[in-house]
Image: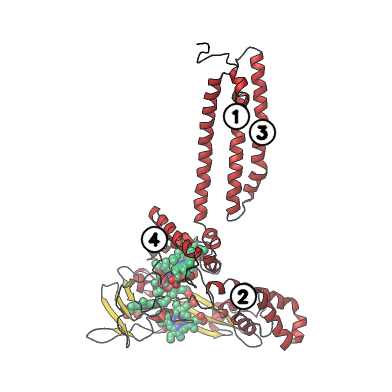
């Protein structure tokens, strides 16, 4: 045997693998290589996540452009420095040239440590990737089909709550079910076989139960004091007269009765059967109140449609709490109250609603033509105003296009009114699906009806009044519209 396993002279290492020998000959070189590898990996992964990130965090920018490159080049500088020091120690007789075995052992150790380090970094990043799959951007923007819900979230009561908080049951099973469902939906998108518009989640029976979603954040039994609601609207006259509706909502809750208590109080259960998929027509209802009394109600002249009954929960009333699609009137009122459409522009309300309601073949066409149509009205009917208030008219036109953009999606079959709001009775039946006065008790005895008495739900303090007395009394009377 002319070469022992631990042959200390092994100059073969130097001739066969000079690069490896240099890299592993001094701890400074090893540390340098480690820094270079980790920096490169982190830099790459950060760049990838930053591309998909929700908002650009300035610190990520500093990391990507300064800190990590500094570590990378620092590490790069350490490698020759270590090699130089190792050479000097060997030359001074303080160390021997590493042989092939030592080189390979050091290399193996180095590679294992690096793999471990990069696995840790990688797992952190893939954790972020999963977190990204849970983000509103992923659900609402990477999937064009859900774009409308993403836009409509902005004008809802939950602009900052993640889609998954209402659509995915917490825990692993819920996560997997959601991903399986999502994959199924993605296939339909790829094959372009999804319904347009997408059916409301309640109608497809896909909505996660509120106990796992809403009630993680809101308590079912919390008691709310009556709440004053002031609804601002503008009329269709020349002056766009501002009017207010003032309601005192009797929300209640728990054993305190009121709106929440009557349907969600302890022991209370209301079940119903609808005769249509979106649950807008409800002929049959069964109720159990706080005292345990049960009643069955049937709409006048209707038959029990049969089939599964559903237990009433939060989303039966708050169906648009996640994404509120507006009516053209609501959208224009909101923009006028916010001053985006100047309320002093004559006939602005009437014209704006008309322009929004017109039919446009595509969203792109609407975005171009809405501002033009709005301006055209003033040019043709009120030329003086048209030239004197050009800037206001342009600003209003742009705001109108935005209102259209966040509510109507012709290519996805979403028109004004495709997704009605059930929490009221103004646009569609809403509460009146049951509280229409025609649902009465079944069986022997005196027939009673589910009440339609206005004051069980709200005290009606003013309806579309220009200057409601109640607001004077409360010291919050409306001012004049902004110029
Ligand atoms: C606060 C709770 C909540 C949040 C947050 C929420 N949703 Fe919903 N979502 C609902 C409810 C409730 C329904 C059922 C509406 C119905 O059946 O009338 C629904 C229905 C849907 C539907 C079916 C179509 C429709 O409009 O009815 C889609 C698609 C949808 N949501 C996507 C999303 C996306 C994407 C996000 C995130 C940008 C999101 N949701 C965030 C509560 C929420
Ligand atoms: C992740 C927590 C979370 C989830 C899930 C959630 N909400 Fe909310 N919700 C909030 C927060 C926070 C607010 C804002 C409270 C505020 O502004 O005072 C809010 C506001 C509301 C409001 C408006 C309250 C007001 O003052 O007008 C309603 C109604 C509501 N949520 C109902 C629901 C319903 C129904 C669901 C389920 C479909 C739900 N929430 C799911 C956290 C949540
Ligand atoms: C029968 C219909 C109905 C059901 C069911 C219902 N709500 Fe409400 N909720 C209302 C109405 C109506 C209001 C008052 C809205 C307003 O002020 O304009 C309200 C108000 C609220 C508010 C605001 C409370 C406050 O103090 O300002 C929250 C939060 C809320 N609901 C959450 C829920 C949650 C969570 C559930 C399910 C556990 C639920 N609601 C079930 C009809 C309902
Ligand atoms: C699925 C049917 C259904 C819907 C939808 C519904 N309710 Fe009810 N509601 C009932 C039933 C059933 C009762 C119990 C009536 C009884 O026992 O006399 C009730 C009772 C009430 C009560 C108590 C009445 C009293 O005499 O004290 C209030 C308040 C109320 N509902 C408000 C609302 C509001 C507000 C909405 C809409 C946001 C709504 N309800 C939607 C079925 C419904
Ligand atoms: C079963 C409950 C219930 C009954 C009964 C009821 N309302 Fe309402 N009403 C509501 C709810 C909920 C809203 C929505 C409040 C909001 O937008 O926050 C509402 C809204 C309104 C509005 C404002 C509509 C708008 O958007 O401008 C008016 C006006 C109104 N109700 C009048 C009445 C009158 C008059 C009666 C009696 C004939 C009545 N309501 C009966 C629950 C009820």
Where is residue 158 drawn, in percent x and y?
Answer: 51, 65
Viewer-side residue, 154 vs 7:
7
Q: CA distance from mark 4 to mark 2?
A: 35 Å
Residue at x-position 62% and y-position 13%: 94
Q: Is residue 21 left or right of residue 392?
A: left
Cβ–Cβ below 8 Å for labels 1 and 2?
no
Q: Earlier in the sequence, mark 4 or mark 2?
A: 4
Q: CA distance from mark 1 to mark 2?
A: 60 Å
Disc 3 versus disc 2: nearer the observer: 3
Q: Which circle marks residue 31 in the picture?
A: 1
Q: Which residue is mark 3?
A: 74
Q: Which residue is mark 2?
A: 335
Q: Is residue 66 left or right of residue 46?
A: right
Q: Is residue 476 left or right of residue 271?
A: right
Viewer-side residue, 93 vs 165:
93
In the image, farthest residue toward the left: 444
Q: CA distance from mark 4 to mark 1?
A: 49 Å
SS category of the residue bearing label 4: helix
Viewer-side residue, 424 vs 171:
171
Q: Which residue is mark 4?
A: 212
Q: Earlier in the sequence, mark 4 or mark 1?
A: 1
In the image, farthest residue toward the front: 1
Q: CA distance from mark 3 to mark 2?
A: 55 Å
């Amino acid at each position: 045997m002319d070469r022992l396993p631990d042959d200390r002279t092994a100059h073969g290492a130097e001739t066969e693998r000079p690069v490896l020998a240099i890299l592993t000959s001094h701890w400074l070189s090893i540390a340098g290589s480690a820094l270079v590898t980790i920096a490169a990996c982190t830099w790459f992964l950060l760049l990838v996540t930053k591309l998909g990130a929700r908002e650009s965090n300035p610190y990520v920018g500093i990391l990507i452009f300064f800190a990590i490159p500094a570590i990378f080049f620092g590490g790069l500088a350490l490698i020759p420095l270590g090699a130089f020091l190792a050479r000097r120690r060997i030359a001074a007789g303080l160390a021997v040239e590493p042989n092939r075995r030592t080189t390979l052992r050091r290399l193996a150790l180095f590679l294992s440590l690096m793999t471990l380090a990069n696995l840790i970094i990688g797992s952190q990043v893939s954790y972020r990737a999963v977190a990204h799959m849970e983000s509103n951007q992923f659900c609402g923007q990477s999937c064009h089909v859900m774009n409308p819900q993403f836009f409509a979230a902005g004008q809802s009561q939950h602009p900052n709550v993640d889609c998954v908080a209402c659509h995915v049951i917490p825990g692993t099973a819920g996560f997997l079910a959601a991903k399986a469902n999502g994959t199924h939906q993605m296939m339909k998108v790829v094959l372009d076989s999804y319904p347009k518009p997408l059916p409301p989640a309640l109608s497809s029976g896909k909505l996660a139960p509120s106990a796992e979603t809403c009630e993680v954040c809101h308590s079912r039994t919390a008691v709310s004091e009556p709440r004053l609601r002031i609804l601002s609207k503008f009329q269709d006259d020349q002056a766009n007269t501002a009017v207010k509706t003032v309601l005192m909502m009797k929300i209640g809750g728990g054993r305190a009765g009121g709106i929440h208590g009557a349907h969600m109080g302890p022991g209370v259960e209301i079940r119903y059967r609808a005769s249509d998929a979106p649950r807008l027509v409800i002929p049959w209802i069964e109720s159990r109140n706080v005292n345990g009394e049960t009643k069955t109600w049937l709409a006048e002249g209707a038959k029990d449609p049969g089939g599964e009954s559903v237990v009433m929960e939060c989303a039966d009333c708050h169906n648009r709490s996640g994404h509120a699609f507006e009516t053209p009137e609501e959208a224009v009122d909101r923009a006028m109250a916010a001053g985006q459409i100047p309320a002093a522009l004559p006939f602005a309300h009437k014209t704006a609603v008309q322009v929004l309601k017109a039919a446009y073949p595509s969203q792109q066409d609407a975005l171009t033509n809405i501002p033009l149509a709005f301006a055209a009205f003033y040019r043709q009917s009120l030329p003086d105003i048209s030239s004197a208030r050009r800037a206001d008219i342009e600003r209003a036109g742009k705001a109108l296009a935005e209102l259209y953009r966040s509510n109507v999606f012709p290519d996805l079959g979403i028109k004004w009114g495709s997704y009605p709001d059930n929490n009221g009775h103004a646009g569609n039946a809403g509460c009146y699906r049951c509280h229409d006065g025609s649902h009465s008790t079944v069986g022997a005895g005196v027939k009673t009806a589910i009440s339609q008495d206005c004051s069980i739900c709200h005290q009606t303090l003013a309806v579309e009044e220009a200057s409601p007395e109640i607001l004077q009394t409360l010291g919050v009377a409306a001012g004049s519209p902004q110029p």
